[in-house]
Image (cartoon, rainbow, N blue to C red):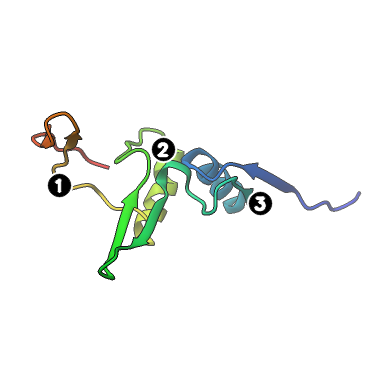
Amino acid sequence: MQNTVAKVTVVGSGISGSVCAATLARNGISVTLFDSARVPGGRMSQRREISEDGRELLFDHGAPYFTVTNPDVLSVVTEWESRGLVAEWKSNFGSFDCFTNKIVNTEHQFSV
């Protein structure tokens, strides 16, 4: 009987692709992860820019938070948290209303 090595390609490095790839790798499967963007992460990614005065500006893309109910996904997110890749959201956040030029809905608090 031949001994074969399983190799899998995952297309898309957003949260679903990342969890899929991590789960496969944890189970001994060789995984290659592809994404069409410059950097991995999909809606979890962050862009860094340098302002005219030299300050670093960080822009989070996509969902500002997510919740986890699936135990398999929770184990991956817990691993990410231990590596400092994600953190529990403990602050309020709001939305910018471009019509009134004000931050609105800041009273809600969510957990990641």
Residue at the (63%, 48%) spot, across then down: 34
Give the vertical position of 112 relative to 51 (above or below).
above
> Dots 1 and 3: beta carbons under 8 Å?
no
Residue that sits furthest to the front in the current view:
52
- Amino acid marked by disc 1: Ser
Q: Nearer the viewer, mark 2 or mark 1?
A: 1
- Amino acid marked by disc 2: Pro
Say which mark, if any, is on residue 91.
1
Nearer to me, 79 or 59: 59
Residue at the (16%, 29%) spot, across then down: 99
The Cα atoms of the two marked residues, 3 and 2, are separated by: 22 Å
The Cα atoms of the two marked residues, 1 and 3, are separated by: 36 Å
For label 2, the residue is: 71
- Amino acid marked by disc 3: Val
Nearer to me, 37 or 79: 37
For label 3, the residue is: 31
Left or right side of 28 for 43: left
| Image coordinates for residue 69, horizontal then vertical, percent | 36, 33
Specify few, some or many for label 2: CA neighbours under 10 Å numbering under 14, 14-19, or 20 or more. few
Task: Give whichever of discs 1 and 3 has the lower sequence position.
Answer: 3
Give the vertical position of 35 relative to 109 (above or below).
below
Residue that sits furthest to the top in the current view:
99
Residue at the (22%, 41%) spot, across then down: 111
Nearer to me, 86 or 39: 39
Q: Nearer the viewer, mark 1 or mark 3?
A: 1
Task: Give whichever of discs 2 and 1 has the lower sequence position.
Answer: 2
Task: Give whichever of discs 3 and 2 has the lower sequence position.
Answer: 3
The Cα atoms of the two marked residues, 2 and 1, are separated by: 25 Å
